[in-house]
Image (cartoon, grey):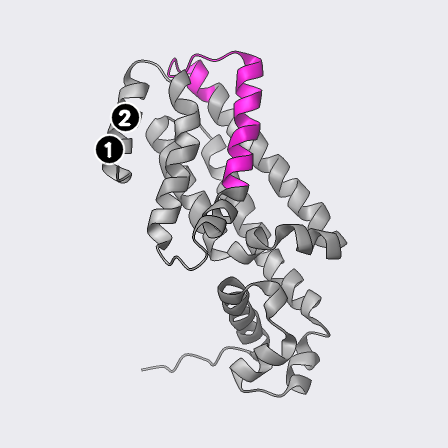
Amino acid sequence: MERKPKRRTRERIIETSLRLFNEFGEPNVTTTVIADEMNISPGNLYYHFHNKDEIIEAIFSVFERQIEETLAAPTRRLANVEDIWLFLHLLFEEIWAYRFFYRDLNDLLTRNRLLEIHFCRILAHKVRTAQTLCDGLVSSGAMRATAPERRALATNVAVLATYWLSFEYARDPRGKAETDRLGRGVYQVMAMLSPFLIGDAKGLFDRLAREYVAP
């Protein structure tokens, strides 16, 4: 049996940093803590990354590529309510995997111009994707909403998807129920669309809500 090659130190630094940032918050994790966690010298870490911001930018590069792919997927054809429900689960799972960006968002954007520019693009993509999904539901006869209502819904979807985990964290900082948090976020986004759904689409939403969200 062939042995898997050992991961490079750079990759291990990125993986370890992401785990620590997610668990403790980026401001509470120093490069010394990362090196100690990996049992390597600070000099070894600095050989690969000159400072913590370079580590953050490397993590963000991976996150940006993945979330842009996720946001592009549901706009390639008309999506129904079940498709949107699944898409939102995938989106929230992506956000959860890199949740420190969202929990520490204001501080990170204030400090790092690169993140400020690129995260703004991600937010704009979220709005565009939500707008396309709402327009598609109207085109397929599953939703009744005016153009201004759809624009407002698209913005609200992006806002809620971006800040839901911050709300959950503030409400229960020590909570560990990952699946429940994500499920509630998906439901809250869909609940904004619910009053505008009609016919079979409204019935499908009601069924999905009963199956996935505890009372």
Residue depicted at 38% across the width and 22% down the height: 194
Q: Amino acid at mark 2?
A: Asp
Q: Amino acid at mark 1?
A: Arg
Q: Which residue is mark 2?
A: 206
How far is the residue under mark 1 from the one under mark 2?
A: 6 Å
Percent position of residue 158, x then y: 55, 35
Q: Which residue is mark 1?
A: 210
Task: Determine the secondary structure under disc 2.
Answer: helix
In the shown orientation, is residue 54 left or right of residue 33? right
Residue depicted at 71% across the width and 72% down the height: 51
Percent position of residue 16, x then y: 52, 72
Q: What type of secondary structure mainly makes up the magenta span?
A: helix
Residue depicted at 57% across the width and 57% down the height: 62
Percent position of residue 100, x then y: 55, 57
Closest to the observer, 53 or 128: 53
The N terminus is located in which quarter? bottom left
Please say if 153 is above or below 4. above
Q: Disc 1, disc 2: CB below 8 Å?
A: yes
Closest to the observer, 91 or 111: 111
Task: Determine the secondary structure under disc 1.
Answer: helix
In the shown orientation, is residue 2 left or right of residue 160? left
Indicate yes or no whether the magenta region holds residue 149: yes
Magenta residues, start to end: 136-162
Percent position of residue 200, x then y: 28, 17
- Is residue 78 visible in the rendered image? The answer is no
In the shown orientation, is residue 6 left or right of residue 180? right
Farthest residue toward the front?
171
